[in-house]
Image (cartoon, rainbow, N blue to C red):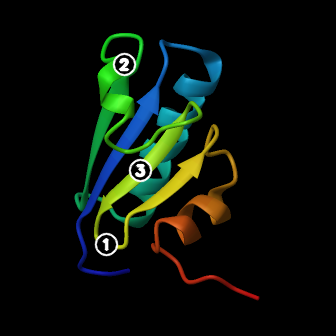
C-alpha cells in the first residue's frame, strides 16, 4: 500500500458490456487496494468525442492514469486484475 492518490480517467463509448465491466472492475480494484485514495472520471466519447484527442485515445474502453506520474494507459475491460494493478503501479511487477 502507498500514500499516493490515483487520478484515473476511463474512456468509454456508451454503456456497452465492455465499458460497464471496465468500470466495475476498476472500482473493485481501487476499493480493495487503494480505498479513499482515488478519483475515477468516466468520459463517454459518444457525448464528448472531442475529449479523445487530449489523451490520444484510439480504442475503447481505455483507462488513463493521470496521477501519480508517469501517465499510463490500459486498454480493454480491465478483467486482468494483476495487469491493471501493475499498470497503475499499485503493485510491483513480478517476473
Labels 2 and 3 touching (C-beta < 8 A): no
Residue 46's place in the image compared with 36, above or below, is above
Residue 65's place in the image compared with 40, above or below, is below
* Secondary structure of the residue carrying numbered label 3: strand
Residue 36's spot in the image, x, y percent?
23, 58
Labels 1 and 2 touching (C-beta < 8 A): no
Residue that badge 3 annotates: 64
* Secondary structure of the residue carrying numbered label 2: helix
Q: Which quadrant of the figure has residue 59?
A: top right
Residue 77's spot in the image, x, y percent?
63, 37
Residue at the image position 47 percent from the left and 34 percent from the top: 23
Pointer 1 local density, CA inside 10 Å: few below 14, some 14–19, many at least 20: few
Q: Which quadrant of the figure has residue 35?
A: bottom left
Quarter of the C terminus within the rendering: bottom right
Residue that badge 1 annotates: 69
Specify which label sits upstream in the sequence, 1 or 2: 2
94 left or right, relative to 66 = right
Residue 46's spot in the image, x, y percent?
41, 11
52 left or right, relative to 22 = left
Amino acid at each position: 500500500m502507498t500514500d499516493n492518490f490515483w487520478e484515473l480517467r476511463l474512456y468509454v463509448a456508451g454503456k456497452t458490456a465492455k465499458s460497464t465491466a471496465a468500470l466495475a472492475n476498476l472500482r473493485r480494484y481501487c476499493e480493495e487496494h487503494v480505498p479513499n485514495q482515488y478519483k475515477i472520471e468516466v468520459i463517454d466519447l459518444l457525448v464528448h468525442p472531442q475529449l479523445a484527442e487530449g489523451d490520444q485515445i484510439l480504442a475503447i474502453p481505455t483507462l488513463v492514469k493521470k496521477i501519480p506520474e508517469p501517465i499510463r494507459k490500459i486498454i480493454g475491460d480491465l478483467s486482468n486484475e494483476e495487469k491493471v494493478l501493475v499498470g497503475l503501479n499499485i503493485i510491483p511487477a513480478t517476473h
